[in-house]
Structure formats: C-alpha cells, structure tokens
Image (cartoon, grey):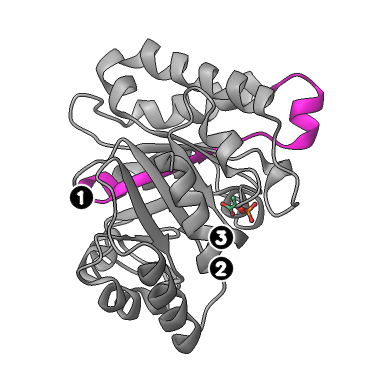
Amino acid sequence: MEQATKWVIGNWKMHGTLAANYELIANIRALIPTLDDRVGMAVCPPFPYLVQVAGLLEGSGIALGAQNLSANVRGAYTGDVAGAMLRECSAQLVLIGHSECRAYQHEDDELIARKVRAALDVGLVPVICVGETRAERESQQTQTILARQLDAVFQLLDTAADSCIIAYEPRWAIGTGVSATPETIAEVHGFLRSCLIAKDAKFAASTPILYGGSLAAGNAREIAAIDNVDGGLIGSAALRAEEFATVYRAFLGV
Ligand code: PEP
C-alpha cells in the first residue's frame, strides 16, 4: 500500500449493519469524491463487514482496515482471524493494541508486538496504538508507559523495511468526549517522535503519528495544526459521514 504522509482513519468498533454501512460509505464518498494524495483515508469495520465494505469502497481510494488480528498464521485458535484472511478480504491496514483490546482482551505488550510482526509479514500496515491510563498520567508515568509500549514493538521490527503507523490514544480521552489538550498532544507527539528518531531517523521521518481520543469536527482544526500530529484515529465521529469528512478536510488544511 502506498503510504500517505497523513492519515484519517475511522474505527467503527462494534457498530454497523449492512444497511448502515452502505449509507455511511455512500455519504462519505459523496462528501469527499476525491481523496488528496497527502492525506489517506481508511475505515475499519467489524470483521463480518470487511468484504461488503471493500466492495463499497471500490474506486474511491479509501483504504480498508481491520480492527485486530491473530498473532498466529493459522490453526486451532477459535474466534481469531489471521492476517492472510484480512488480506484476502482486501484489508490494507489493521489496528493493533487498541486500548479496548488491551483492557478487555488483556492484550499485553509482547502479544501486541507479535501481532504487529504478523501483520507486516502478510503485507498489512499496522496502526500501532499506544496510550496511558488516567492513573498512569496522574502519577507522571506517561513517557515510561509509552516508551515501554513502543520498545516491545521495536524488538520485532525491521525499521529499514517495515512500514507502520503509530496512534497516540490516551485511554482517558477515548469515548469520553474530552480530548487531550493541545499542549498535552504536542508534548506527547514530540516525545513519540523522539523515540522513533532514537530507533531510526529515516523510519521516524516516514512514520505518521496519529492522535485519537474524542477527535471530532469541533476540535479537528486545532489538533491538525499541532506539530508531529500526522492525522487522526477517529471512533464515534467516524460513524457520522459529515463529521468524518470535516475531520478529513481539517487534516488537509481546507
Ligand atoms: C478510538 O476508539 O480509537 C477512538 C479514538 O474513539 P473516540 O474517537 O470515540 O474517542
């Protein structure tokens, strides 16, 4: 997949129906008939809708993403979905390490790193989600937590060859309607960029760092203007075409 320098990615979580998906994609396509090369757009529907949504996206340039994958290639893993299956359903990206998976499915750093490797091995671009809890922030552990989450992934990454997207998603800002402040976002994204540079300067320059957590039409312009913010991972606002299109336009600067 061609890597855009910025990305606006919709995480539909466990929402959607065949009819609602049809309407949502039709409305997004009507609002943004042509994508700009500088800002990629992707949607990540639940697994059962990947094939349907792939069809609805045909000719739009909008990329298809999945919300998770197995760290394993195939086998007796009931309920899991392999990366190759996602590729066969036309997925190009996959969210990995989303805070809801870390929290509810108890995914740890080591498993997340293996999932990133599994995604890369089949040609999926991993959208690696990192973020701290409110308690971790309040006890000044944000940088330690983020560095630990990134380091685990770095262990299995070949930065000379692998193409990734990072998403900073403070857990306390997800689904709350209260995003991180511009000052916090600037500070954390600067820190994440410095971690990437310390690993590999070339990789750091080509890896978009997205912000996620109550990013919507109302705050998109302000967030898009922050240094080292290369797009957004959008939850609830991605289910409303008008709002999702507004966020896209904000990252385009129009
Ligand atoms: C998310 O789930 O990735 C997310 C950012 O959610 P929301 O935009 O609803 O906070």
- Examine the rendered structure and indicate whether residue 188 appears above or below residue 165: above
Q: Residue furthest bottom?
A: 19
Residue 252, given in percent of the width and then of the height, sits at 40, 42
Location of residue 62 (image quadrant): bottom left
152 and 200: which one is in front? 200
Closer to viewer: mark 1 or mark 3? 3
Quarter of the picture holding the C terminus: top left
Whether residue 71 is visible, yes or no, is no
Give the residues drawn in magenta, as a range.
119-141
Alpha carbon separation for disc pair 1 and 3: 30 Å
- The residue pinned by badge 3 equals 243
- The residue pinned by badge 2 equals 240
Q: Earlier in the sequence, mark 1 or mark 2?
A: 1
CB under 8 Å between discs 3 and 2: yes
Q: Residue furthest top?
A: 198
Alpha carbon separation for disc pair 1 and 2: 30 Å
- The residue pinned by badge 1 equals 123
